[in-house]
Amino acid sequence: MYIPSKKELEKLYLKQGKSTQEIARLFRCSLNKIRYWMEKYDIKRRTISEAIYLKNNPDGDPFKLTYPNSIKDAILFGFGLGLYWGEGTKMDKNTVRLGNTDWNLINKFILFLIKIFGIKKYDLKFSLQVFNDIDEKEAKRFWMKKLGVQESQFYKSTITKSVRKGTYGKKSNYGVLILYYHNKKMRDALMKLLVEEK
């Protein structure tokens, strides 16, 4: 019976990110045997959430935090943190989420995510919240044009019965746009920055 070495298991599990099931298949043995030797070698196993994250991101984190190295980037850094602090949804533990009616503000936050966190714009998702007296398709076209994003990046819109009166309606002719970036690790990194900056 072949016994895998600690070095082999560390390489497969920790460095290559393989699951215990995949390692068991490689060695043609039972899952329990691999778990036994990992415990014997004191190799800490991943939590369920860590395992799910690794499965969803097999090539590593889809972002990389880069601290500003110019005044321009430092201003963007502070602006992005301020936007998230004021307009972001902090209760969502798995997603960076921010909503607003101002396309300039949303674009600035997208620039912050791209320059500071190195995300890809096509990984962003969006949803619209509009009143029923707003043309949802026209609103979506407006946001797509202003943000330079595709219709495939949008979730189904939320349509609410209008109760607006007076001039308030002019403020949200195209609804509220909500931006999403689904990555728990990045959300945690952003929250950590908010705590550090206080």
Image (cartoon, grey):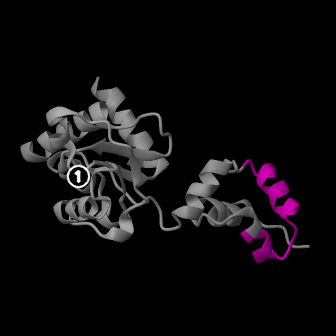
Q: Residue at x 84, y 67 (%)?
A: 3
* Residue 180: image location, x then y, percent: 38, 52
* Residue 16: image location, x then y, percent: 58, 67
Total numbered labels? 1
Q: Residue at x 40, y 41 (%)?
A: 189
- 3 inside magenta stretch: no
Point out the image quarter for the C terminus. top left
Label 1 sits on residue: 174
| Occupied quadrant, residue 67 | top left
Task: Give the camera-side residue of 170 and 119.
Answer: 170
Task: Give the camera-side residue of 125 and 129.
Answer: 129
* Residue 176: image location, x then y, percent: 29, 46
| Occupied quadrant, residue 99 | top left
- 33 inside magenta stretch: yes
Q: Residue at x 18, y 51 (%)?
A: 103
The magenta stretch is: 22-42
37 sits to left or right of 96: right
80 sits to left or right of 38: left
